[in-house]
Image (cartoon, rainbow, N blue to C red):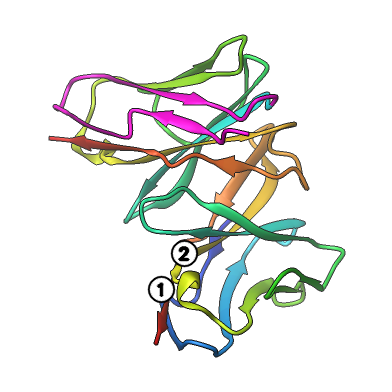
Amino acid sequence: GESVGLHLPTLSVQEGDNSIINCAYSNSASDYFIWYKQESGKGPQFIIDIRSNMDKRQGQRVTVLLNKTVKHLSLQIAATQPGDSAVYFCAENGVTGGGNKLTFGTGTQLKVEL
Amino acid sequence: KAGVTQTPRYLIKTRGQQVTLSCSPISGHRSVSWYQQTPGQGLQFLFEYFSETQRNKGNFPGRFSGRQFSNSRSEMNVSTLELGDSALYLCASSLQGLIRGNTIYFGEGSWLTVV
């Protein structure tokens, strides 16, 4: 069945370093993915998205890479800052049960060390 | 403009009771979707409403229900509360619903504790 999972529950990086957060999916029909950031006590915040007809998409300090061959996507954050500390989720927006829904991964806690 | 507003932010209920949570979407948004977030299960889709009609539903028991009003405001209800219903309930709104490429905005959530 469909699943969207994350490899690592916690990632610690030094301020200024680059961060890479990974996500695996099992449904080869998945064709649209979203990354969200959730800070403590807040709702998820949209970061960046990518469609399956793309391999890479860049935003401000963030890049998402999609490898359809191994059903894997990653979120790269350049020059990680303390404000980047949060839980990051990947999500698939797909059709199931007769309609669209968001299926989320388990999340990765990013901790930025000063 | 104002974001997605959820009320109440925190509440404590007793097993067997029922609870109603409210969500006001961003002005102009016609889609509201609901999610349950727990440490064990993560973020799970509950249902989506668009123009007062439920368009899709997740794998939750019938104790979980929702509705949407003509002004797009939405409520979700959980009856006969169980301890396992303790969670953060998130509401999200979007212009056109859960369609690829349509940005979905989340509220801050309602923290429900069942004792």
Q: Which residue is mark 2?
A: A107
Q: Quadrant of residue B89?
A: top left
Q: How many marks?
A: 2
Q: Quadrant of the N terminus of chain B?
A: top right
Q: Is residue A57 left or right of residue B83?
A: right
Magenta residue check for B10:
yes
How far apart in space, not on screen, are marks 2 and 1 (Cα)? 7 Å
- Badge 2 vs badge 1, beta-carbon distance below 8 Å: yes
Magenta residue check for A92:
no
Q: Quadrant of the C terminus of chain B?
A: top left
Does residue B66 lie above or below B84 as drawn?
above
Q: Position of residue B102 (x, y in %)?
A: 75, 43
In the displayed orientation, state which residue is furthest to the top.
B70
Q: Which mark is residue A9?
A: 1
Residue at horizontal 26 percent and vertical 19 percent from the top: B18
Q: Magenta residues? A: B1-28
Residue at horizontal 48 percent and vertical 87 percent from the top: A15
Q: Please name the amino acid that badge 1 sits on.
A: Pro
